[in-house]
Amino acid sequence: MTCGEKITELRKKANITQQQLGDELNVSAQAVSKWEHNLAEPDVTTIKKICLYFKISTDEFFGIEKEKPEEKPEEKVEEKKEEKPAPAPAPVVIVKHTPQKEFLGVCTRCGVALDKSNVGVKAPKMYCQNCYADMLAEQEMQKRRAAAEVKQRRRDSLNNATELKNKSIRWGLLITIPIFIINLLVLIFGKLEPTYLAVYAPLTVFGGYAIYALVADYIIHDGIVGDILEFFICAPIKFPGIIFSFDLSGFIFLIALKILFAILGFIIGVILFFVGVGLGSLVAAFVFPFHMAKLNNEIKTYKE
């Protein structure tokens, strides 16, 4: 009978649970379960506590029985006295003891007693081989999960950067091509003089590129170009207050000035719009190549 089977037999005879036995021995119910399933063995000190609790000897716990000399039947007493033979020597009883294992401690996770045969790691905390293997598997799973998250973030960043680049090119061409076509038609059918043509042609090429750079740079980089556009386009236009009298002519005067201010505000807004677009295009023509190069470097980095 194994050690675990003996503990199971004693516990069931005493009609107690694994938890009750563990409380008496200052160990967990999981440790008692592992003993009974022969997944671990209690140390010598714990075995003595078990024997003391169940009121048995260690020999009874390990199933060691002393051999008793066979009793010989009494010989009939003969009428004549005969010499008694010398008594046979008593049989030698050989008792095998289980070698004591060096107690190292208790598993921090499951509470099983540890020795050299089942210890997994000793520092910084002590774990059995099974718990240590589970911990290593969990750590490996966490490393793989973290690596997958980093890879997913890089993939998302690559997709966002690529989409931003494609969007800037798409919208830049969508706005620039019609303007370039109009200027090209003017060059072809405008019948410009050679002097004006020599000036208008380079301006058409540079202007088309500048408009493209303005739109694309505004999309890929919210920097100085966006600040210029917002300043000129979104700047509020304020007019002075109007003093009028509370009569019919005063109200007519007020309405006329309101309409006039509305028209002036619209005209000023259009002028500011073109000023902002012109200044923004001029700045974008120089900063756009650097922003596009930076975006390409980011895409290249995410692909690696």
Image: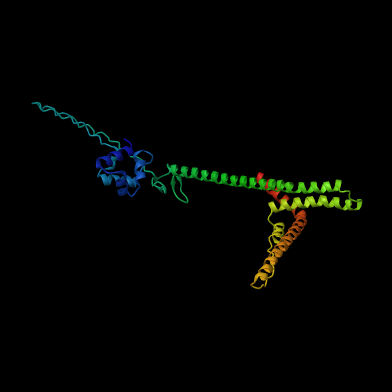
How is the protein colored in the picture?
rainbow
Q: Is residue 93 left or right of residue 129?
A: left
Q: Where does residue 70 sit, x and y in percent of width and height?
A: 21, 31
Residue 30 drawn at (x, y percent) = 36, 44
What x and y, as percent, mark residue 269?
72, 60
Q: Does residue 101 appear to the left or right of 74 in the view shown?
A: right
Which residue sits at x=75%, y=51%? Answer: 213
Dividing the picture into quadrants, the one containing residue 73 is: top left
Outermost residue, left side: 79
Assign the C terminus to one quadrant of the image: top right
Q: Residue at x 80, y 52 (%)?
A: 207
- Disc tally is 0
Outermost front residue: 248
Q: Quadrant of residue 117?
A: top left
128, 71: nearer the viewer: 128
Closer to the camera in the image, 285 or 292: 285
Camera sees residue 251: yes
Q: Compared to 100, does 75 lie above or below?
A: above
| Residue 210 horizontal side relative to residue 39, left or right | right
* Most foreground residue, 212 or 264: 264
Q: Residue at x 71, y 58 (%)?
A: 229
Res 291 visible: no
Residue 297 point in image, percent of width and height: 70, 48
Q: Quadrant of the N terminus?
A: top left
